Image (tube, helix red, strand yellow):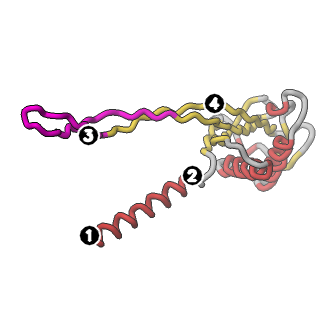
Amino acid sequence: MRTLQRTSRWLFVLLATVVLAACATGPQVRTDHDPTANFSQYRTWSFYSPIAMEESGYSTWISDRIKDNVRREMDARGYRYVESSPDLQVNFQGVVQDRTDVWTMPRADTQWFYNYRRKAYVAVPVWYDDTQVSRYREGTLTVDLVDARRNRMVWTGAAIGRVVNKTPEQKMAEVDQAINAIFLQYPHRAATP
C-alpha cells in the first residue's frame, strides 16, 4: 500500500511539473518563407514605411520596444541598417482577438433508484459528456521581412499567446520574449560582401 501511495505521489509531482513547464514555455511561434527568395543576397535593412502597427500615424511605447528588439536581432545576424535603398524592409503588427475554447470531458456518475421488488435502493451507473467553455483574448505579433526591390514578403514569423492584464514592465518582457522567439526561427544571416 505504501509503495502505491509513493508511486501515485511521484506521478502527481511529475505531472504537475510537466504542466507548469508547458505553461512557462512562452508564445507559440509560426514561420513561413518564400521558397523562391534568395536570402544570400540580402545585406542591409530598414523599417517598412508605414509600419502596420503605426498605421494610425503615431507610435507607442510597445512599437518603440519592438523596433529596438528588431534592431538588436537584425544586427546580431550581421545585417546593416540603412535609411535608403535597403535590401530588406521589416514590418510588424499586433492583433488581439477574442477566442473561445469548447471541449467535452466524459464523466461517469451513479444514480440511486428505489427498487420496489427488492425493497432497497439500487445504484445505476450513468455516463455523460460534461461541456466546458473558456473565453480568453489571444494576441498575435507578426514580423515580416520584405524584399525591398520587389516589394514582396520573403519571410514571416508570428508569436501567438494569451493576453492577460499585466504591468507595463511585464508587457515589455513579453514583447522581448516574443521577438526573440520569432527570430530564433529565422535561419539566415546577412550576405558577406
- Say which quarter of the image contains residue 163: top right
Residue 32 position within the rendered picture, expressed as x and y whole percent measured from the top left: 62, 38
Q: Nearer the viewer's eye, disc 1 or disc 2?
A: 1
Residue 118 in the magenta stretch? The answer is yes
Query: Would residue 59 be seen by someone viewing this image from the given angle?
Result: yes
Query: SS class of the residue under badge 4?
Result: strand
Disc 4: which residue:
98
Residue 157 position within the rendered picture, expressed as x and y whole percent measured from the top left: 67, 40
Q: CA distance from mark 3 to mark 2?
A: 35 Å
Residue type at mark 1 is: Met
The local crowd at label 3, few if under 14, some if 14 to 19, many if 20 or more residues have their Cα within 10 Å, is few
N-term-proximal mark, 4 vs 1: 1
Residue 109 position within the rendered picture, expressed as x and y whole percent measured from the top left: 29, 40
Query: SS class of the residue under badge 2?
Result: helix
Residue type at mark 2 is: Cys
Residue 82 position within the rendered picture, expressed as x and y whole percent measured from the top left: 90, 44
N-term-proximal mark, 3 vs 2: 2
Disc 1: which residue:
1
N-term-proximal mark, 1 vs 3: 1
Disc 2: which residue:
23
Q: What segment is highlighted magenta in the picture? A: 108-133
N-term-proximal mark, 4 vs 2: 2
N-term-proximal mark, 1 vs 2: 1
The local crowd at label 1, few if under 14, some if 14 to 19, many if 20 or more residues have their Cα within 10 Å, is few
Q: CA distance from mark 3 to mark 4?
A: 38 Å
Residue type at mark 3 is: Thr
Residue at point 17%, 39% (across, down): 121
